[in-house]
Image: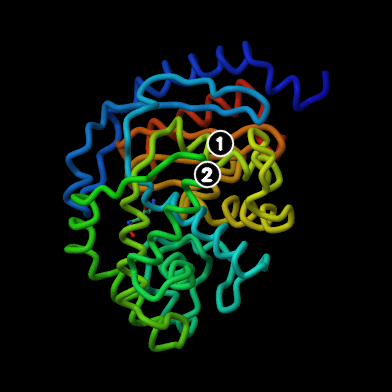
Amino acid sequence: MNDVDRRAARPRIEAAVRHAHASAARVTGDGRAAQYIPELAKADPGLLGIAVHPLDDEPVLAGDVDVPFTLQSVSKVLALALVLRLENDTWLDGLAVEPSGDAFHSIVRLEEEAGRPRNPLINAGAIAVTSRLPGATSRQKSRAFTEYLRELDARPAYRLDRDVYRSEARTGARNRALAHFMNHHGLVDDPDVAVDAYFRQCATTISARELSGAALFLAGRGTDPRSGRSFLAREQTRSVLAIMAMCGLYDEVGRFAVRVGLPAKSGVSGCILAVVPGSMTIAVFSPGLGAEGNSVAGMRALEVLSNDLELSLFD
Ligand code: DON
């Protein structure tokens, strides 16, 4: 049995998922649901779902894996994958790929660095990516995004959580400021369209079970082994994973590298998507966030899984 087979052996994964769920359940009360989008503040911090999807097997599930949540910043990874595919590139003009060391909505460096976002996973960079989705209106861009999701998981439709969308649109002055600032610097054509499409993309709902399946191509060098379909070229997939590893957890990315050691992306709804290249995807969901805006129980679950299954890329 080679290393990947050993890590992916099902009984071992099942035991690790049970352990991760029990351990993470003890800390769900330590975090607080995101408050800055009023609709997200209503989430039950006691929810906890874990979905581990091996490339060659059905997902191993525990807890609230079918409870829908909004993708929030995890959508940034999927929008990036789509734009890289459409532009047939591994790198996006105008965007750096350096860790920011700042909060996800930081505007500070944008000012210092002439409107050039540090990476495509902080809000500024993600809004610039979304502005490159096909379509002239925010609805068209949003449709291109949900269409891609539908293809990824072969599902009929993805729903927009209108309450979360409206709540964020009402309170998203800072994101609007970022978009307008980038427009001033020539990186975003129509800032109002870009930011509205971004709010829609963030408010698209998914469950942990679905997310682990939809992201499988990221573990499979761009190909989903269930269908054999390629959604991204191998080198583009490598680029997305490298960006996730360097920039996916904002100013907690270093701690995450030490504790978990995987490319990952978090969202303020409490989800974290982690990828074990060549082996599996992991989607965790628990709405209570720590000070840096990442799910406390989700982090704990990933730490246990990484330890028990020896998943760290640095091991
Ligand atoms: O831009 C926002 O405020 C949100 N819609 C997404 C932010 C987010 O999920 C940050 N991630 N931890």
Front residue of 58/187: it is 58
In this picture, is 213 found above or below 136?
Answer: above
Picture coordinates of residue 54 (x, y %)?
63, 27
Front residue of 234/63: it is 234
Picture coordinates of residue 237 (x, y %)?
67, 53
Front residue of 14/313: it is 14
> What amino acid is labelled 2 in the image?
Arg
Give the structural element (helix, strand or loop) at label 1: helix
Indicate which disc residue 259 carries. Answer: 1
Q: Write down the quadrant of residue 189 in the picture.
A: bottom left
**Other residues around mark 2 within 10 Å, as few (<14) / some (14–19) / many (≥20):** few
Callout 1: CB less than 8 Å from ligand 1: no
Picture coordinates of residue 256 (x, y %)?
53, 42
Ligand 1 rendered quadrant? bottom left
- Quadrant placement of the N terminus: top right
Tell me which residue sits at (57%, 52%) in the image.
Answer: 244
What is the CA distance from the residue labelled 1 to the residue labelled 2?
Answer: 6 Å
In this picture, is 68 found above or below 223?
Answer: above
Work out whether residue 291 can be spotted: no
Give the structural element (helix, strand or loop) at label 2: helix
Q: Left or right: where does residue 145 sit relative to residue 193?
A: right
- Quadrant placement of the C terminus: top right
Tell me which residue sits at (45%, 26%) in the image.
Answer: 50
Tell me which residue sits at (40%, 24%) in the image.
Answer: 24
Q: Left or right: where does residue 136 sit relative to residue 59?
A: left
Q: Does the residue at mark 1 contact the one at mark 2 (Cβ under 8 Å)?
A: yes
> What amino acid is labelled 1 in the image?
Arg
Indicate which disc residue 255 carries. Answer: 2
Picture coordinates of residue 265 (x, y %)?
49, 47
So how many labels did they put on this image?
2
